Amino acid sequence: MELAVAAAASLLAGFVDAVVGGGGLILVPALFGVFPQAAPATLFGTNKGGAIWGTGWATLQYARRVEMPWSALLPAATAALVGSFAGAWAVTLINPDGLRKALPLILLAVFAYTLARKDLGRLHEPRFAGRLQALIASAIGLLIGFYDGFFGPGTGSFFVFLFVRLLGFDFLHASASAKLLNTATNAAALLLFGMKGHVWWHVAAVMAVTNVAGSLIGTRMALARGAGFVRGMFIVVVGALILKTAWDAFLR
């Protein structure tokens, strides 16, 4: 029964992740609810073991239908991986409680800005090209990769927002680009958790199958409905993240 619930949660998380990121908002609480006695590190590692397949599959699906600026994204993915390792190391030295309390306010600012700018991310008009685009994308990868390793909630949504705001991508191209970087940060985290024995591989394998299925549905829907649909999903996910992170920081 526990495995079936985890698989169903992974299916829904794969769908959300493929469209706009934020699947961990669904899958991580589900794992904690189903396996309350397990070590948190093991549940986080198992989450990554299932989620990485969905983000990887979404990257491949988007790459077939959306023009991807690989010359900028590959260095950015490398920077995200390095940043994720650095963030995971930093969390062993620094208490993240300050960031935990600041996060709902940061997300609220992103939410309000997106609502206020009704044209934000509707048109794909890249502001930069060549080395400058690669440099800015890599800076985004390093910064949010570090955040993912250090703390984590909302990583995919932050990638999407910064690609829209700083690089001038529409929400569809930003989501497609974010999947590659999110796959890199997931790989870094999975490697660390795996090396320390904090992955239930048998559970992760089942979740991987359903996560890919959810990813397939989400990717096809995003491609069919375009940037407006992805923007709407972004607003919903960020709104949910604000409520979840505010509850964790101030009310729990």
Image: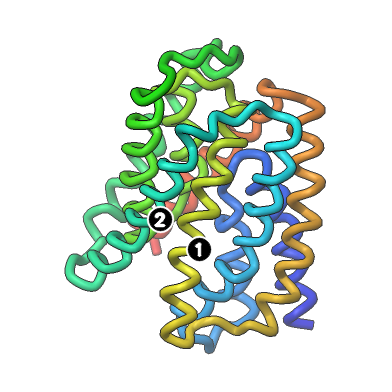
Q: Indicate left or right for 29 with 142 as reference.
A: right
Image coordinates for residue 129, horizontal then vertical, percent? 43, 18
Of the pair 130 and 14, the residue shown nearer to us? 130
Q: Indicate left or right for 128 with 45 as reference.
A: left
Viewport quadrant of the C terminus: bottom left
Helix, strand or loop at mark 2: helix
Q: Quadrant of residue 221?
A: top right
Image coordinates for residue 222, horizontal then vertical, percent? 74, 33
What amino acid is found at the position of numbered circle 2 in the picture? Leu
Looking at the picture, the colour scheme in use is: rainbow
**Rendered view: 48 above or below 57:** below
Instruction: Please rate how many residues cluster around mark 1, counting C-alpha atoms within 10 Å: few if below 14, some from 14 to 19, many from 20.
Output: many
Q: Indicate left or right for 106 with 167 as reference.
A: left
Q: Report, in whole angstroms, how far the alpha carbon at label 1 lies from the one at label 2.
A: 8 Å
Image coordinates for residue 207, horizontal then vertical, percent? 71, 70
What amino acid is found at the position of numbered circle 1 in the picture? Ala
| Discs 1, 2 touching: Cβ within 8 Å | yes
Q: What residue sits right under mark 2 in the picture? A: 81
Numbered disc total: 2
Residue sitting at 32 percent across and 66 percent down? 88
Q: Indicate left or right for 184 with 46 as reference.
A: left
Image coordinates for residue 139, horizontal then vertical, percent? 32, 37
Q: Quadrant of residue 150?
A: bottom left
Q: Quadrant of residue 11?
A: bottom right
Instruction: Please rate how many residues cluster around mark 2, counting C-alpha atoms within 10 Å: few if below 14, some from 14 to 19, many from 20.
Output: many
**Rendered view: 65 above or below 167:** below
Residue 24 is tagged as none
Residue sitting at 39 percent across and 43 percent down? 141
Q: Is tag 1's residue or tag 2's residue first in the polypeptide sequence? A: 2
Viewport quadrant of the N terminus: bottom right
Q: What residue sits right under mark 1 in the picture? A: 187
